[in-house]
Image: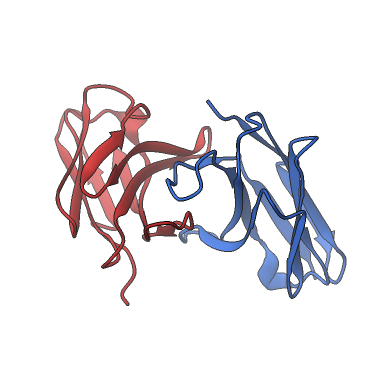
Amino acid sequence: GENVEQHPSTLSVQEGDSAVIKCTYSDSASNYFPWYKQELGKRPQLIIDIRSNVGEKKDQRIAVTLNKTAKHFSLHITETQPEDSAVYFCAATTNFGNEKLTFGTGTRLTIIP
Amino acid sequence: DAGVIQSPRHEVTEMGQEVTLRCKPISGHNSLFWYRQTMMRGLELLIYFNNNVPIDDSGMPEDRFSAKMPNASFSTLKIQPSEPRDSAVYFCASSIPGAAALHFGNGTRLTVT
């Protein structure tokens, strides 16, 4: 089955700087890659996603890039703010529309004021 | 829309007792997922349903765990008998046909003593 690895497990950045979280996946048939944000004590929430026919997607301060050849995708957060502090999970699935996601182990991002 | 509704929010029980977790998906969502989250293992998919039918229960840890979806608006996850290692946050999530974005409930924090 699919295996998703996520790095780093913890990340601290100064407010205003950029943060990058990277994930690799094992199944070359994977075609959908969402990112979820989980604030302390709350539920995971989708923040951005990308499909395998797209190399990059951006939404305001967050962007996701996908390299299908290398089987890795990354989350980029620019101009970080204190409210960006959370745990971020990447995920992958081989069957977009039949939504068995395999999640990474999460990255705890801390924004230092 | 009230989102995915889970109950109870917190459950504390003694080892050996039966535990039942409940979930009401978002109306119109035909896929329902049960995830377990722990510090050690992250987010693990236990089982998921499409149109009330269990599709993949390979993540269910053992026979002590069972899940049902008697209709489109209700699902249960039962643990009998419960053990301390079952302590975790259990999330229910649902999604709409043809889309892979998961909508998570607020979770049930289970503590087995």
Horizontal side of A16 relative to A65 (left or right) equals right
Horizontal side of A45 relative to B59 (left or right) equals right
* Hue used for the chain lettered A: blue
Q: Is residue B17 above or below residue B34?
A: above
Residue B67: where, in percent of width, then height?
21, 38
| Residue visible at 51% across and 33% down in the picture | B41
Residue B20: where, in percent of width, then height?
17, 44
Q: In this view, does B56 lie above or below A101?
A: above
* Hue used for the chain lettered B: red
Residue farthest front in this picture = A53
Horizontal side of A90 relative to A17 (left or right) equals left
Residue A8 seen in the figure: no
Q: Is residue B27 above or below residue A9?
A: below
Residue farthest left in this picture = B70
Residue A95: where, in percent of width, then height?
50, 42
The picture quadrant where one finds residue B26 is bottom left
The picture quadrant where one finds residue A37 is bottom right
| Residue visible at 54% across and 38% down in the picture | A94
| Residue visible at 34% across and 69% down in the picture | B3
Residue closer to the observer: B95 or A108: B95
Residue farthest top in this picture = B62
